[in-house]
Amino acid sequence: MTETQQSQAQQIRIDILKMLYGCQSGHPGGSLSVVEILLALYNHVLRYDPVNLSWEERDRLVLSKGHGCPALYAVLAQKGFFPRESLWTLRQLGSILQGHPDMRKTPGVDASTGSLGQGMSIAVGYALAGQRAAKPYRVFCVLGDGEAQEGLVWEAAMAAAHYKLNNLTVIMDYNQLQIDGTNDQVMSLGSIQDKFRAFRWETLETDGHDINAIAEVLNRPASDAPRFVLCHTVKGKGVSFMENAVGWHGKPMDQEQFNAAMREMGC
Amino acid sequence: MMADKQSTRVAYGKALAELGAKNEKVLAVDADLAHATMTVDFATQYPDRFYNFGIAESNMMAAASGLANSGYTVFASTFALFGAGRAYEQIRNSICYTHANVKLGLSHAGPSCGEDGGSHQSVEDIALMRVLPDMTVLVPCDAIEMKKAVFAAAEKDGPVYIRTGRLPTDICTAETTPFEIGKAITLREGSDVVIFACGIMVAQALEAAELLAAEGVAAAVVNVHTIKPLDEECVLRMANACGAVVTAEEHSVIGGLGAAIAESLMGKTCASFERVGILDRFGQSGKPQDLFREYGLTSEAIVKACQRVIMQKHASSQQR
């Protein structure tokens, strides 16, 4: 990671913390773990146009782990999809920034998600639409790890392989924690890679906090199968007392914790 | 009334294929039931616009929203129970919440699907679909109306539920009968009692009106093909004009047509009121006609309900 990339990721994390402290709700852990994945996508992979939202050939991003949306909102604001001031309205009545992504309210959001497991099926629909119209766009779906406990994910995995959706890439934010504990404590996932391989997907793996590494994997030429990328991440990344801590899935920070977190961000 | 009986699912399949010829943006998706829901007609004629999602209804519904939100009009079909039931939350969050242009043509609704039994006979789909914000709910009464409903649904922006049935049933409407979503059709005028019916119970309601006429009772029959948005103006006008109301549906009396009309009329009319439908029970195996008798989904049941509400009307007018 270059210094510029690091400071960009740091700025996104500062925004996330301010947004979540401001609304005294939301999901810090899974927002902080997905920052570099989103930056890799928006800086080096996705084709998009913040002033032409309905551009048919834009790449689609489905944040299936919708609770990580503060990270997405911070990135979208940075890319000019909406004014930065909107960030401080997160989760408030009438805000364009809902507690979970709402494509009808937020410019740049292509799927309404948050009900876990559904994003991958929606992404299958987008990928089918692109395939049948021979549009050059790609579809990316960011999946949580605990989300793979939903049977729907595997229905979607089967369909994507059946229809040879090589325009579809699923990226897993593999931080190994969920609300009630570690994946292994709650419901073991086994080898996610093996499972996707068994469903006839191309599978790749990378450090989920290295923007260049993520971008390199995502920009590889497509095979004839859908692609699954396992990104190794740390839940709560960047805030020492949140890192790998089960309790920070959906807990608001008090003032002391917020100040401590901001100090760690160099603020 | 035409002598030929036709099922609304067959009419749905034919209409969908016809729509496909006219509109290239129409896609159809199914979950391994194309030969039962009758999307097979569309699939045969337009194989490149048909997607089989296998026995995975939830994925089909969410993927349908992705297709629809890419600019297509998507007709998604399976059995009513597995669409409205199993895939309920996908219909809610991926289709209704995003105002996706998905039309749910769900078949084998109600006990009229017969021998397959209670696990397959949806008695609750109208209730489930009706409560969803943004959902339009259509229950066509015959094959002719089904075709009009399919075309009207395609014209309408946003999600629409179309309930179809397996059993060939009587034709109650004509090609020339106008069809407009949200506009109930008065099939028979009458001043003693009004019967609001939907789906295959419309034919039973017309038969009941004939039986009542023989006793000197003038029953109006209104075909409420659109449960939502309900034609509240028509419902209130007819209820006030007749002073006695009976609803008839091949569905639970909880949450369906009868409930919708009761909600609409509450506090606005003195009309007496009774619902004919399934009384909080599951279905079971049997021949459709036997099941109709078992569950009280007959013209005779409607006649008795009409007689009771007329008696109530007279009793309460004497009290006043």
Image (cartoon, coloured by chain):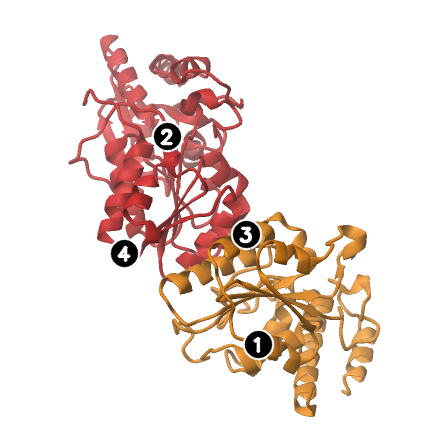
Chain colours: A orange, B red
Query: In the rendered image, which quarter is residue A13 located in?
Result: bottom right
According to the picture, the residue beneath numbered tag 3 turns out to be: A158
**Contact between labelled residues 1 and 3, with CB atoms less than 8 Å apart:** no
> Residue shown at 33%/15% (left/top)?
B299
Q: Mark 2, residues whose alpha carbon is within 10 Å: few (<14), some, or many (≥20)?
A: many
Are tags 4 and 1 found on a single chain? no
**Contact between labelled residues 1 and 4, with CB atoms less than 8 Å apart:** no
Q: Which of pointers 3 and 4 indicates the residue nearer the eye?
A: 3
Kind of element beneath mark 2: loop
Question: As displayed, is residue A217 above or below residue B301?
Answer: below
According to the picture, the residue beneath numbered tag 4 turns out to be: B24
Provide the chain ID for the residue under circle 2.
Answer: B
Q: What distance separates the C-alpha of mark 3 from that of mark 2?
A: 30 Å
Residue B275 in view: no
Q: What residue type is labelled 1?
A: Leu
Q: What residue type is labelled 4?
A: Glu
Q: Which of pointers 3 and 2 indicates the residue nearer the eye?
A: 3
Left or right? Give the position of A229 relative to B24.
right
Percent from the top left, x then y, of residue B142?
A: 28, 30
Provide the chain ID for the residue under circle 3.
Answer: A
According to the picture, the residue beneath numbered tag 1 turns out to be: A41
Q: Which of pointers 3 and 1 indicates the residue nearer the eye?
A: 3
- Mark 3 or 1, nearer chain start: 1
Q: Which of pointers 2 and 4 indicates the residue nearer the eye?
A: 4
Kind of element beneath mark 1: helix
Q: In which quarter of the image is the C terminus of chain A?
A: bottom right
Are tags 1 and 2 found on a single chain? no
Q: Which of pointers 1 and 2 indicates the residue nearer the eye?
A: 1
Q: Mark 4, residues whose alpha carbon is within 10 Å: few (<14), some, or many (≥20)?
A: few
Q: What distance separates the C-alpha of mark 3 from that of mark 1?
A: 25 Å
According to the picture, the residue beneath numbered tag 2 turns out to be: B165
